């Protein structure tokens, strides 16, 4: 007898995050190759929105592959980490990220990570 019921359930949990991760990554690559954010700021806004979608869906994909399902604690941590990475990328791309801002961003991230463990 073949027992691949667990594999089928796991595949259902990771199908949407896998498709969303792949789609948002391809859209970011196409946007980066065909446009210039220096000429139009709207392209940068669209790029960072796509980057947020990519980071969140990639987080869901990793948690889904590792644990099988996503709980409230994992969801909070995915959004927190995605938001902090996105803010870091924004500051880095505008060349406004120095070591003090980086340390503050890491401290805020550690505080939110610690708070998420007690909140959920």
Image (cartoon, grey):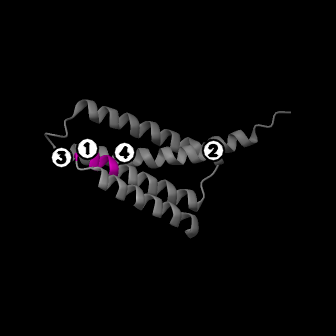
| Alpha carbon separation for disc pair 2 and 3 | 38 Å
Which is more foreground, mark 2 or mark 1? 1
- Marking on residue 66: 2
Label 4, residues with CA under 10 Å away: few <14, some 14-19, many ≥20:
many
Q: Are marks 4 and 2 in contact (CB under 8 Å)?
A: no
* Depth check, front residue: 120 or 1: 120
| 62 lies above or below 80 | above
Nearest to the observer: residue 42 or residue 1: 42
Single out the residue that lies furthest toward the left: 39
Tag 1 secondary structure: helix
**Marks 3 and 1, how far apart at CA:** 13 Å
For the residue carrying disc 1, how many other residues have a C-alpha within 10 Å: few (<14), some (14-19), or many (20+)? Answer: few
Please tell me which of labels 4 and 2 falls first in the chain.
4
The alpha-carbon separation of the residues under discs 4 and 1 comes to 13 Å
The dot on residue 114 is: none
Cβ–Cβ under 8 Å for marks 3 and 4: no
Residue labelled with disc 1: 93
**How far across and how far down the image is residue 98, in percent?**
27, 50
> Height in image: 17 above or below 34?
below
Residue position for label 3: 41
Residue segment shown in magenta: 88-95
Q: Position of residue 77 (x, y in %)?
A: 51, 57
Question: Residue sitting at 46 percent across and 40 percent down?
Answer: 21
Considering the numbered disc 4 on the image, is that residue within a helix, a strand or a loop? helix
Of the image marks 3 and 1, the number of the one nearer the N terminus: 3
Residue 51's disc is 4
- The Cα–Cα distance between marks 2 and 1, rounded to whole angstroms, is 31 Å
Pointer 3 or 4: first along the chain: 3
Can you tell which of label 3 and label 1 is closer to the viewer? 1
Secondary structure mostly seen in the magenta stretch: helix
Q: Position of residue 36 (x, y in %)?
A: 19, 36
């Amino acid at each position: 007898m073949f027992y691949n019921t667990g594999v089928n359930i796991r595949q259902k949990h990771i199908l949407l995050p896998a498709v969303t991760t792949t789609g948002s990554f391809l859209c970011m690559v196409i946007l980066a190759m065909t446009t210039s954010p220096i000429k139009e700021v709207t392209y940068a806004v669209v790029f960072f929105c796509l980057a947020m979608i990519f980071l969140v869906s990639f987080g869901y994909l990793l948690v889904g592959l590792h644990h099988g399902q996503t709980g409230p604690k994992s969801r909070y941590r995915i959004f927190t980490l995605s938001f902090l990475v996105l803010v870091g990328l924004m500051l880095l791309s505008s060349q406004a990220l120095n070591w003090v801002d980086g340390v503050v961003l890491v401290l805020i991230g550690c505080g939110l990570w610690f708070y998420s463990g007690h909140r959920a």
